[in-house]
């Protein structure tokens, strides 16, 4: 009976979350993902106990996380951020990695646990940031390109670090496997970019309004193939999902703008209307509030990790700030850089599965990630508006992405 109740409650919470977000939005703009997590926490085992952990919901949640990273990879315009923004963002992330590992090892009871903490602190939630930038009309500005570059590196870099250091292999073997995956994914992207793919585009266009829905089916195939490849190679599945987004963007790069907008709307419906909310609601359901409260020092670690996200990830992100950026813009770049959650969830799950991270430490890290998503983007947008003297830009006219985690 409990499992049947969960089947109804999860989609119910997915419907309730945007209603609550819209009501609260009259006072303050809070990311939708915050409400999804909080509602999941309320009905989960930590509080009401109406929705238990289950293999079926966990599978859907993992697919939701994969689709979140697919959408992030699909949305990045590498041509717009190449050069200084991407190079400076990359340097900033390497500094974050060094700081995170040192601080993590100092804080943790073991070197292994310190590596997990350090990598978690280097992430940036690109899937949360990009919709906010788009709605604020910042995607094509130097400020928006800088934040996008930081987010892209802050999402891709930790995935590489997970594959190298948390796979259970020696770093040399892990690096060789990672290179093998990169060659396969790179070959696919190169082949996709060689021609206009007119036949593919013709099939996509012909099935846009039919039951064929070739574009959506192709997405699911690409995501499944690269996710399964990454898992088979012992890499993190999110690396495959991220690469799938880049590959799909290249495949459809020659399609007409109206077709692309229509396809994107369908992908958003599948991702943000179904799978991604399940991931964030299930994150709340599985959040171990009991361990956070009862384990010694766990509750104290939450504000420590919250501050460390800003120190480890935010401050190095300043390197990517546009030339001549104001103090407010620099502060906004740092705050956006320090916004992290999905990769923190992924890293802590691995740490718990391997028995390296304590439940209280994992909960403190995830809790800090939740707070970062709630606080940092709101303050960052406020600082950016101050830099613009209170002026508001019109939302970008390009493909709209809903405000989601």
Image: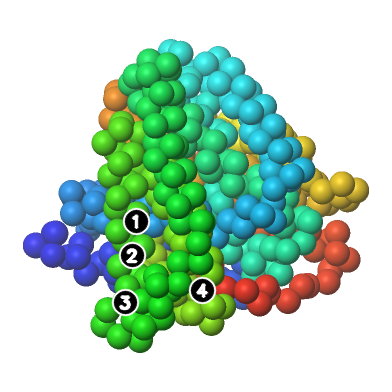
For the point 34% across and 54% down, the residue is: 223
Q: Which labelled disc corresponds to residue 255?
A: 4
Q: Nearer the viewer, residue 344 or 181?
A: 181
Q: Give the SS element for disc 4.
A: loop
Q: Nearer the viewer, residue 172 or 386?
A: 172
Q: Pointer 4 and pointer 1: residues touching (CB < 8 Å)?
A: no
Taking the view exactly as shown, the residue that stands out farthest to the left is: 1
For the point 36% across and 83% down, the residue is: 206
Where is residue 382 drawn, in percent x and y? Answer: 75, 60
How far is mark 4 from mark 1, CA to CA? 18 Å
Q: Pointer 2 and pointer 3: residues touching (CB < 8 Å)?
A: no
Marker count (numbered): 4
Lower position in the chain sequence, tag 3 or tag 1? 3
Where is residue 242 drawn, in percent x and y? Answer: 45, 49
How far is mark 3 from mark 1, CA to CA? 15 Å
Q: Pointer 2 and pointer 1: residues touching (CB < 8 Å)?
A: yes
Q: Pointer 3 and pointer 1: residues touching (CB < 8 Å)?
A: no
Taking the view exactly as shown, the residue that stands out farthest to the front is: 195
What is the basis of the colouring in this image?
rainbow
Lower position in the chain sequence, tag 2 or tag 3? 3
Q: Is residue 346 visible?
A: no
Circle 1 sits on which residue?
Answer: 222
How far is mark 2 from mark 3, CA to CA? 9 Å
Dividing the picture into quarters, in which one does residue 257 lie?
Answer: bottom right
Where is residue 272 drawn, in percent x and y? Answer: 42, 67
Circle 3 sits on which residue?
Answer: 213
Q: Give the SS element for disc 3.
A: loop
Circle 2 sits on which residue?
Answer: 218
Q: Give the SS element for disc 2.
A: helix
Q: Is residue 55 left or right of residue 402?
A: left
């Amino acid at each position: 009976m409990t499992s049947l109740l969960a089947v109804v409650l999860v989609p119910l919470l997915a419907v309730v979350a945007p209603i609550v977000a819209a009501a609260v939005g009259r006072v303050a703009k809070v990311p939708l993902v915050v409400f999804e997590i909080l509602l999941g926490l309320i009905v989960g085992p930590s509080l009401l106990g109406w929705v238990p952990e289950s293999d079926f919901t966990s599978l859907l949640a993992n697919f939701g996380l994969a689709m979140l990273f697919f959408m992030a990879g699909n949305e990045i315009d590498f041509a717009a951020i190449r050069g200084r923004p991407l190079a400076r963002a990359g340097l900033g992330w390497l500094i974050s990695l060094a700081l995170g590992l040192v601080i993590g090892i100092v804080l943790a009871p073991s070197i292994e646990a310190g590596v997990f903490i350090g990598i978690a602190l280097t992430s940036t939630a690109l899937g949360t940031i990009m919709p906010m930038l788009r709605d604020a009309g910042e995607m094509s500005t130097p400020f928006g390109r800088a934040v996008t570059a930081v987010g892209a590196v802050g999402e891709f870099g930790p995935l590489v670090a997970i594959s190298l250091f948390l796979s259970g292999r020696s770093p040399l073997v892990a690096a060789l496997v990672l290179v093998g995956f990169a060659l396969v994914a790179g070959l696919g992207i190169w082949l996709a970019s060689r021609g206009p793919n007119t036949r593919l585009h013709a099939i996509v266009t012909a099935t846009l309004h039919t039951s064929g829905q070739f574009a959506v089916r192709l997405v699911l195939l690409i995501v499944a193939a690269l996710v399964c490849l990454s898992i088979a190679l012992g890499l993190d599945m999110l690396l495959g999902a991220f690469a799938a987004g880049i590959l799909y963007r290249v495949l459809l790069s020659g399609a007409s703008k109206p077709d692309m907008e229509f396809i994107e709307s369908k992908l958003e419906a599948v991702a943000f209307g179904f799978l991604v909310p399940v991931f964030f609601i299930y994150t709340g359901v599985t959040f171990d509030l009991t361990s956070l409260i009862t384990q010694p020092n766990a509750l104290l670690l939450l504000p420590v990790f919250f501050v460390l996200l800003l120190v480890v990830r935010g401050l190095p992100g300043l390197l990517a700030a546009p030339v001549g950026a104001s103090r407010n813009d620099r502060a906004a770049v740092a705050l956006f850089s320090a916004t992290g959650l999905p990769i923190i969830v992924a890293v802590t799950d691995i740490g718990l599965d391997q028995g390296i991270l304590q439940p209280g430490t994992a909960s403190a890290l995830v809790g800090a990630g939740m707070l970062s998503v709630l606080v940092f983007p709101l303050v960052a947008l406020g600082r950016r508006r101050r830099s613009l003297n209170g002026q508001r830009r019109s939302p970008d006219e390009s493909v709209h992405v809903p405000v989601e985690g």
